Image (cartoon, rainbow, N blue to C red):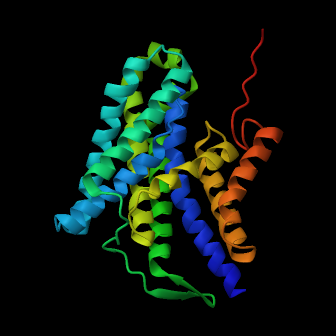
Amino acid sequence: MPLFIQLTLTGLTNGAILALAALGFVLIYKSSDVINFAQGEFLLIGAYVIFGLIAQFGIFWPLSMILTILIAVLLGVAVERLVLRPMIGEPIISVIMVTIGLSSLLKAIVSAIWGTIPQAFPAFIPSTPVKVLGASIGADRLWALGVAVVMLALFNFFFTRSREGIAMRAVADDQQAALSMGISVKRIFAWAWSIAAVTAAFGGMLVANIVGVSGELAGFGLRVFPVVILGGLDSIPGAIIGGIIVGLLESYTGGYIGEGLNQVLPFVVLIVILMVRPYGLFGQEIIERV
C-alpha cells in the first residue's frame, strides 16, 4: 500500500507538470492550427533561465520566478511575431518544419550560454521526505503538485472568465466569426504563444527543482505528445486529464514492472489511441462533406 501511494503521488506530480506543458501545446493548436515541436525547448529555457538568475546572478527566487515568466512572455511574442506570423498562408508542413528548426535553434542557444554539462539546481523548494499515509515522498514533489494544480486552476479561470480568455476560445472555434466580431486574431495568436511559453517555463522550473538542469529536459517536452493525443489536440480539459493519465501510467509501470518500459508505454498508448479514436478522448471530431 505505501508503494502504491508513493507511485500515485509521483505520477500525479509528473502528470500535472506534463499537463502544464500540454496546455500551451493545445492553446497554440486551437488558435492557429500549428503543431509546436519547440514546446520542450520552451520548458528547457524556463529551467535554465531561473537557474541562471538564482545560481549565477544570486537573485532571490521569488524575483527570479517573476523575471523568468516575463522572459517567457517575451520569447512567446518574439517567436509569434518574427517566426510564425510570416508563415501565415504557407502550407502546414512548412510551418511544422519551422517549429522543428526553432526547437534546434533554442537548444543550441541554451548550449552556447550554459554548456552541455548537467548541473545541480539551487533548490528553492524543500526536498525533505514527508510521510503521506505511510508512504515517503519528497516535499518538493508535493509542492510541485500543488503549484501545478494552482496554475492549471488559474488558467482555467482565465479561459472561462476573462475577456482575453473568451476571445481566445472564440478564435479557436471560428477565426472568421471572431474577426467579424472585432477580435484581433493576430493579437490572440501572440497571447497563445506567450501563454504556451509561460506554462512550459513553469513546468521547467518545477522539473529542474526535482531533477536538476540539463539538455535532457527538452525530452520532457516529447512526452507531451502522448498527452495531447490522448486528451485531444484541441481540448484543454483533455490536456489536463491526459497529463494525469500518462503520469500515472509512467509511475505505475516504472514502479511495478521496471524502469525503461515506463518511457515507452505512453507512446504505445499514443498508437492505440490513434488507431481507435484518432481525435483523442475529448477531441472534437471534424466531419467534412465533399
Q: Is residue 246 left or right of residue 66?
A: right
Is 254 or 238 nearer to us in this picture? 254
Identify the residue at horizontal 66%, vertical 40% (top origin): 232
Classify residue 262 by image quadrant: bottom right
Identify the residue at horizontal 46%, vertical 52% (top origin): 218
From the top left corner, tell me how far across and down residue 96 is, in percent. Answer: 52, 28
- Quadrant where the N terminus lies? bottom right
- Quadrant where the C terminus lies? top right
The answer, for residue 183, to whether it is visible in the render is no
The answer, for residue 114, to whether it is visible in the render is yes
From the top left corner, tell me how far across and down residue 252 is, in percent. Answer: 71, 71
Identify the residue at horizontal 45%, vertical 57% (top origin): 217
- Above or below 62: residue 266: above
From the top left corner, tell me how far across and down residue 153 is, in percent. Answer: 49, 55
Is 141 or 175 nearer to us in this picture? 141
From the top left corner, tell me how far across and down residue 177 is, in percent. Answer: 52, 16
Q: Is residue 288 left or right of residue 161?
A: right
